[in-house]
Structure formats: structure tokens, C-alpha cells
Image (cartoon, helix red, strand yellow):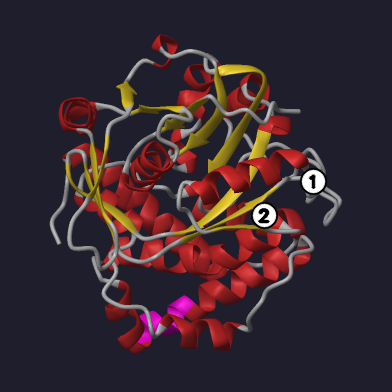
Amino acid sequence: MASHFFKNICIYGAGALGGSIAAKLATGLKGQADVSVVARGAHLASIREHGLRVWEAGASGPVEARVIATDDPSELPRQDLVITGLKGHQLAAAASGMATLLHPGTRVVMILNGIPWWYFHRDRQSSYAETQFEELDPGGALWRQLGPERVIGCVAYQGAEVINPGEIKLSNNGRYVLGEPSDEHSTDIEAISALLTQAGLNITISPNIRNEIWNKLLGNAAFNPISALTRALMSEIMVDPGLSKMVAQVMNEVKAVGEALGARFALSIEERVEQSKAIGPVRTSMLQDLLAGKSLEITPLVGMVVSLGRLAGIATPTSETILALVTQLDRQTQLHGATTA
């Protein structure tokens, strides 16, 4: 579909993860591509004035990069590659803006936690191919304006946090898993993988991106909402007997729903829980958003476990309880502003 000459690359949503990728692309592909970001507020102002500053794990100094920065995507030319740094609950509102960046060959790498809006496009694991979700894509804006055929899925294992406007700290040496919704090993995905690898990102291509989505969702569906409800770091959750038991309950529900839709999991729940005990004092992205007074990424991480459970006839009682609690927490946060740790 795409031309493999990536002259124009835009990161749409240059927060913690998107901003770090933009900095890598700008420094790693210097002179080979025009890298732009769509951002907003104080973060945008700082990027315009000082560029992006990214502290990689263990580094003695930041990576500094200058990029084209705007809050109006219509100011940018049509892009050969768009990489989204937005969260799942933010995408639909940005559909029309992203659409202005597309030409017929543009591919869109969507870095998302949880169940993505395009999940059932060209799905051969279940009997629900091309099913759309109103809760993820109200009015079908993303499906209609972007088109699932442009999408390359991406699962990110990269801890990142905006510590000051324009300044990002990475907590680990991350990796990114790419996959076509069709699970084909296309020339497009090979070219994009090579491009991102050249920029210094750790990239692998999955023969089954849906399995990758579900394997990561095991942790996201449990740790993100529990951390927001308790204000606890991941390490604190795992040393609390009641909370660690709840983590295992959520993981079991996620696994049951995923398997009912054809997904396969790399580890047993017991192994996954044990692995989680080694995670350090990490503040989840949902807890970061809560403390900043931002809306929470609930539907892709928790709501869809419940919705897909109903679709597949799988009971998810713990996830349903957590969904009700974290939804009310989000409602109160939006009414009353940021909370404190």
C-alpha cells in the first residue's frame, strides 16, 4: 500500500511515549526525513522553544532533538507515516485532525494499550471479523476517516513519563512489537520496522499482533485501574496480599476472555503474577493521568474486557467491579480536578 520512502513522518500526540519516539526519529534519521509532532499546551510551547529532551534509562544526559511542532495538523504536509502517541480514549476526537495528514499510501502505526478500535479488522481468530465498537470509536469516525486498512498495530513495552514540559524520562530500555491486523508479513511492515530500528528503537514484528495485545492487557487491565484507585505503585500493589490477589483475579478474567476469542498466552497466570513481583516502584500511566487531573484510559483497558466478555459469554465479575469504581473516580476527578498521591 505505502511508498517506502518516508520523507514526512508525524508523531500525533507527543506526550511521554510519542515524544520519546519523535526525539529518536529526529536524531536517528537526521537529514533523511522531516519529523513533526502534534502536541498541545505547555508541552508544545517548550518543544517549540527548546526542542525535546529525553532521558534514557541510565543515561548521564538527555537526548536533545528539534522537531516541527504544532497543535494544528492542517499546517503540516501530507505524511508518509503517522505514529500515534494518543491513548485509546483520545483517538476518536483526533480522527479528523489525523485525516488531514493522510495521502493514499500513508500507513498509521497505532501504539495502544488495551483493545484497539480496529481489533476485529481482518481477524481470523474469532467469528467477529469487522465488528466495530461504538465505545471505542463513537460514530465510526476512526473507521471511516482513517480506515483500518492503514493501521499497523503496535504494543509498547516502554515506561515513560513527562517530568517537565518538553522533557521526558524513560524508566527502561523498551521494546516495540509491530503487527499487521491481517498478521501478514508485509513489505510495509518490514520497511517501517527497518526505519524505526535505524532510529534506535528496539523493534520486533509479530506474526500475531492480537496475542501480543492480550498478553500485555493482562497487566494493564489489572495494574492501571488498581493503581489509580489506591494511588499505589506497582511494587506496592504486589506486596499487598489483598491487592495482589485482585491482580490475579483480573488476569484470570482477561485470559478467559482472550482465549474465547482465539488468543494464546505466553505465560500462565501464576507465572505472570510471579513476574510482576519483580517490577520496581513504577507509577502506571493511569495513575500519572489521575494525579495530573486528566481523563483516564478506562474503556480500552477495563471496559472492553467486560464488553468482550459479554460478547463471548465469559463472566468478568472482578473487572466489572473495578470498572464501576474507576469510572466513578474518573467522573469525580473531572468534576473536582487533580488529586494528590
Q: Is residue 259 above or below residue 207?
A: below
For image coordinates 45% across by 52% down, the residue present is: 200
Q: Nearer the viewer, residue 86 or 187?
A: 187
* Magenta region includes residue 172: no
Q: Is residue 324 visible?
A: yes
Structural distance between the alpha carbons of marks 1 and 2: 20 Å
Q: Nearer the viewer, residue 318 or 96?
A: 96
Q: Nearer the viewer, mark 1 or mark 2?
A: 1
Residue 19: x and y, percent? 34, 41
Q: Is residue 208 left or right of residue 80?
A: right
Image: magenta residue range: 242-247
Residue 132: x and y, percent? 70, 36
Q: Is residue 339 left or right of residue 274?
A: left
Q: Is residue 276 left or right of residue 266?
A: left
Q: Is residue 314 above or below residue 94?
A: below
Give the residue number, with chain letter if any, for mark 1.
182
Label 2 SS: helix
**Main secondary-structure element of the magenta-colored stretch:** helix
Give the residue number, with chain letter if any, for mark 2.
308
